[in-house]
Image (cartoon, helix red, strand yellow):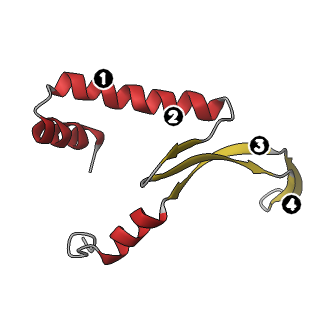
Amino acid sequence: MTKAEIIAEISSKTGIEKMDVQETVEAFFKVVKTSMVGGENVYVRGFGSFVVKKRAKKTARNISKNTAIIIPEHFVPSFKPAKTFVEKVKTGNKTKASK
C-alpha cells in the first residue's frame, strides 16, 4: 500500500477531503522525522514506537582493496511494533500477503 492509497482510504472512511488528509499525513511524518532527528523517540500506543538506535563504532573490511575501514558511531531510525499490533498481524488473513 502506498502513501497515496493510504490517503485515499482514510479520505473515503472519514469523509474528509483528500487534500486535508494528505496535509495531516505529511504533518505526522514531518513531526516523526524532526523528533527523531532531535534524538527524541515517538510512541504511538497500540501501533508501535519510532526509536533512535545508537550503533557503536566498528571496524569493517573493504575486501576488494583488502583495507580496514573504521565506521564511527552513528544513529539509525528504527520501528518497534506494539504487541497488540504484532498479534493482529499474526492472526490476520494471510491470503494477500503471499503475493
The x and y percentages for residue 32 are 51, 34
Asked whether 14 or 57 is in front, the reply is 14
Query: Which residue corresponds to the image point at 13% horizontal and 42% vertical from the top-left?
Result: 13
The Cα–Cα distance between marks 1 and 4, rounded to whole angstroms, is 49 Å
Report which residue position mark 4 lands on: 66
How far from the left and from the top, in percent, is residue 8? Answer: 16, 38
Q: Dots 4 and 3: beta carbons under 8 Å?
A: no
Three-letter amino acid code at the position of disc 1: Glu
Q: Tag 4 or tag 1, which sits nearer the N-term?
A: 1
Indicate left or right for 65 with 52 as reference: right
Look at the numbered disc 1 and give the secondary structure of its residue: helix
Kindly state the secondary structure of the residue where label 3 is placed.
strand
Give the residue at x 42% y 65%: 84
Q: Earlier in the sequence, mark 2 or mark 4?
A: 2
Residue matched to label 1: 23
| Relative depth, front residue between 62 and 3 | 3
User: Residue 69: percent from the left, percent from the top?
Assistant: 86, 51
State the residue position of label 3. Answer: 74
Instruction: Report the amino acid beneath label 4.
Output: Asn
Q: Which circle, 4 or 3, is nearer the viewer?
A: 3
Disc 2 from disc 1: Cα separation: 14 Å
Give the mark, 2 or 1, whose residue is nearer the N terminus. 1
Q: Nearer the viewer, mark 1 or mark 4?
A: 1
Query: What label does residue 2 carry, if any?
Result: none
Q: Amino acid at mark 2?
A: Val
